């Protein structure tokens, strides 16, 4: 198994689609517990260590977001779309299920908004060059727009807007994305000067994206053999059904189930890339 790093992107453009200079979101010394005293998920700690070890690489915050949208020539089919976005840290809501939501931003007029409206599940690919690690995060993305009624989410959207540099804010006032510019286009529409009044709050075109991570596939390419750790989130319904099934099993059925699990574990250890499954 091999992985090829994509060519390094130019700093022009990508360097400021984002936010004012700030410290790293995660470090190797980040606390292992939440303020509530609960342990952070292992994948969050692993990702924090990876970011800390690659913090000298300015491109380590760039991630690839893949969505699914309608096929341009066949309305009965869908096709994947992928683009580079910037990791904005984690959003932590009040409820436990609202912890560690991956933050991104986008323009409400972009294609990905239409894709997520029909197919909210997406996947992120994140490669760290120095440590030769790849993370694949999959889950459901919630779009926080000017129409979102939740006050806490609107507050998070406004806070994220405040983190942006002026040059990044102006881009949300540019003409419609992916539309051809007319020959007589006024260069003034791309002026870097921030219009009066917009600094106080985000325009309708500014959206905050929050991914509720359901599975994390962490591949380490340096070890021999390569190491893969898969973290997955089980729904409460699945856990409840498993408890009910185990409670109703006879001793013989439980013994057979245990033997099957031992066989699966043995098969895992015989694989070239060791796999460890954990729950998010």
Image (tube, rainbow, N blue to C red):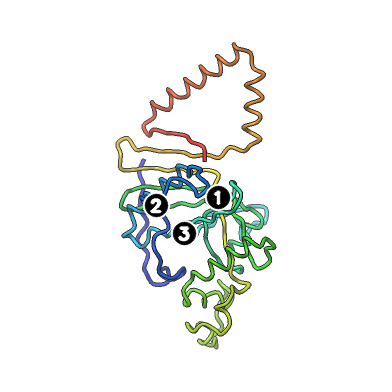
Q: Label 3 belongs to which residue?
A: 87
- The residues bearing labels 1 and 2 have C-alpha atoms spaced at a distance of 23 Å
Percent x, y of residue 122: 56, 51
Task: Measuring from the top left, give residue 61's x and y in whole percent.
Answer: 41, 59
Judged from the image, the secondary structure of the residue bearing numbered disc 3 is: loop
Q: Nearer the viewer, mark 3 or mark 2?
A: 3
The residue sitting at 66% across, 35% down in the picture is 237
Mark 1 burial class by Cα count in 10 Å: few <14, some 14-19, many 20+: some
Q: Residue 41 location in percent, x, y?
A: 48, 43
Of the two numbered discs 3 and 2 on the same chain, state the one appearing first in sequence: 3
Q: Is residue 280 above or below residue 150?
A: above
Q: In the image, what residue occupies the spot 67% across and 18% down?
A: 248
Mark 1 near mark 2, Cβ–Cβ under 8 Å?
no
Q: What label sits on residue 127 in the rendered view?
A: 2
What is the number of the mark on residue 99? Answer: 1
Which one is in front, 9 or 227? 227
Look at 51% across and 37% down and name the residue there: 279
């Amino acid at each position: 198994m091999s992985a090829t790093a994509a060519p390094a992107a130019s700093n022009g453009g990508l360097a400021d689609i984002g936010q004012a200079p700030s410290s790293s979101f995660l470090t190797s010394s980040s606390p292992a517990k939440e303020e509530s005293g609960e342990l952070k998920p292992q994948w969050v700690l692993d990702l924090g260590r990876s970011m800390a070890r690659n913090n000298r690489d300015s491109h380590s915050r760039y991630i690839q977001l893949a969505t699914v949208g309608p096929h341009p020539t066949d309305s009965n089919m869908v096709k994947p779309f992928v683009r580079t976005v910037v990791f904005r840290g984690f959003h932590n809501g009040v409820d436990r299920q609202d912890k560690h939501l991956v933050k991104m931003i986008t323009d409400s007029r972009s294609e990905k908004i239409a894709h997520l409206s029909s197919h909210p599940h997406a996947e992120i690919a994140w490669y760290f060059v120095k440590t030769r690690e790849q993370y694949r995060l999959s889950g459901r993305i919630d779009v926080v727009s000017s129409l979102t009624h939740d006050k806490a989410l609107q507050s998070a959207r406004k806070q994220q807007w405040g983190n942006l540099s002026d040059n990044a804010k102006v881009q949300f006032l540019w003409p419609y994305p992916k539309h051809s510019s007319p020959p007589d286009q006024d260069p003034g529409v791309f002026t870097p000067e921030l219009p009066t009044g917009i600094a106080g709050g985000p325009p309708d075109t500014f959206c905050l994206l929050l991914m509720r991570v359901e599975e994390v596939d962490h591949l380490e390419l340096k070890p021999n053999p390569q190491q893969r750790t898969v973290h997955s989130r089980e729904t409460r319904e699945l856990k409840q059904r498993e408890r009910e099934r185990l409670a109703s099993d006879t001793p013989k059925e439980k013994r057979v189930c245990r033997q099957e699990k031992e066989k699966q574990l043995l098969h895992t250890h015989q694989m070239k890339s060791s796999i460890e499954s954990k729950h998010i």
